Amino acid sequence: MISILFVCHGNICRSPMAEYIMRDMVEKAGLSREIRVASAATSTEEIGHGVYPPAKRMLSAHGIDCTGKTARQITPQDFTQYDYVVCMEHYNLRHLRTVVGVALAEKACCLLDFTAHPRDIADPWYTGDFEATWRDCVEGCEALLHYLQQTSA
């Protein structure tokens, strides 16, 4: 089984959006038994909080339910439990070094690095643009799923 952990700062906007978008794609592709998906935060600020309401509404508008998801912080053990640790932006990669150490953080990458146009996914907490975050997460998840299907074929 392939396991993916999406990571952002608080685990209430971008990483849960990516988690549930990818879960939806994996299910629709009939790969639920082959790919496991979760998400976590680099910070402790939002631990225990649910998905931020505008992010939850965006997922819901696309028929995706994230009920029950609560924020948690990434741990060093996650690097042994997940094959892919996928951050939403380079700031998250840098912050991982302080949370789990430099050696473990080297395993991580950014979601849009799997696309033809690598870039950061802007934090909608600050931009307010949850539609742009949705589009970026979909683009990245599609590219990551394609990559996984190609490398495991």
Image: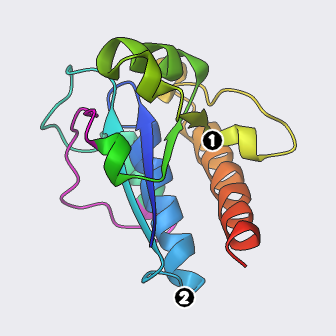
The quarter of the image holding the C terminus is bottom right
Q: Is residue 74 magenta?
A: yes
Q: Nearer the viewer, residue 7 or 2?
A: 2
Which of the numbered marks, if any, corresponds to residue 111?
Answer: 1
Q: Is residue 48 magenta?
A: no
Is residue 96 toward the left or the right of residue 128 in the image?
A: left
Give the residue number, with chain letter if any, for mark 2. 30
Residue drawn where x is 67% and y is 56% of the image = 144
Is residue 17 toward the left or the right of residue 110 in the image?
A: left
Q: Amino acid at mark 2?
A: Gly
What secondary structure do most residues of the magenta stretch adopt?
A: loop
- Residue 74, located in which quarter of the rendered image? top left
Residue 56 drawn above or below residue 11: below
Residue drawn where x is 23% and y is 53% of the image = 69
Neighbours of disc 1 within 10 Å: few (<14), some (14-19), many (20+): many
Residue drawn where x is 70% and y is 39% of the image = 112
Which of the numbered marks, if any, corresponds to residue 43?
Answer: none
- The outermost residue toward the bottom is 30
Q: Nearer the viewer, residue 104 or 125?
A: 104
Q: Nearer the viewer, residue 45 or 5?
A: 5
The boundaries of the magenta stretch are: 60-77
